Image: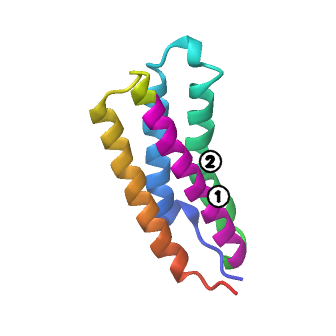
Amino acid sequence: MRRHNYKNLKIWKIALEISKDISDLLNNFPSSEKFNLVSQMSRCSISIPSNIAEGSARTDTSFSYFLNVAIGSSFELSTQLLIAQHKKYINEEELLSIEEKIIEFQKMRMSFQNKLKVG
């Protein structure tokens, strides 16, 4: 069984960068969102690189499942970013900066997943 070193994967690196960016953004959210949007966005952004890391130790078929979970979390995070912008917790520049990384991650994940030996 081939294992992937997740720390060498570009998709993991960009996912970790997204998670760090979200963590920095969340420091500026109102405390009233601590158990709502802040918690959701934090867990969601952490889920993306975490699922890649966990899946990398599995078979390619299992890894593919974890990559699907990671991309699901990325779409969830995109929605939460739009909600944060609507509530004026982030501005358009912050939104676009992270959205660009999320879109790049999604494209990279599709390309990487297509190269796995699944089946």
Query: Which corner quadrant holds the C terminus?
Result: bottom right
In the rendered image, residue 109 lying in the magenta stretch gets the answer no
Please tell me which residue lies in front, 46 or 73: 73
Q: Quick check: 8 left or right of 57?
A: left
Graded by Cα atoms within 10 Å as few (under 14), some (14 to 19) or many (20 or more), the crowding at tag 1 reads some
Mark 2 or 1: in front is 1
Graded by Cα atoms within 10 Å as few (under 14), some (14 to 19) or many (20 or more), the crowding at tag 2 reads many
Could you say whether the residue bearing mark 1 is in a helix, strand or loop?
helix
Query: Measured from the top left, where is residue 25 in percent x and y?
Result: 43, 28
Q: Which mark is residue 69?
A: 1
Q: Is residue 50 above or below residue 42?
A: below
The amino acid type, in three-letter code, at marker 1 is: Val
Q: Which residue is mark 2?
A: 47
Q: Is residue 54 above or below residue 34?
A: below
Q: Is residue 103 above or below residue 22?
A: below
Query: Measured from the top left, where is residue 81 in percent x and y?
Result: 45, 36
Q: Which residue is found at the position 46% from the left and 55% from the top?
A: 13
Could you say whether the residue bearing mark 2 is in a helix, strand or loop?
helix
Q: Which residues are magenta?
A: 61-83
The reply to whether dot 2 and dot 1 touch (C-beta < 8 Å) is: yes
Query: Which corner quadrant holds the N terminus?
Result: bottom right
Query: Measured from the top left, where is residue 5 in percent x and y?
Result: 58, 67
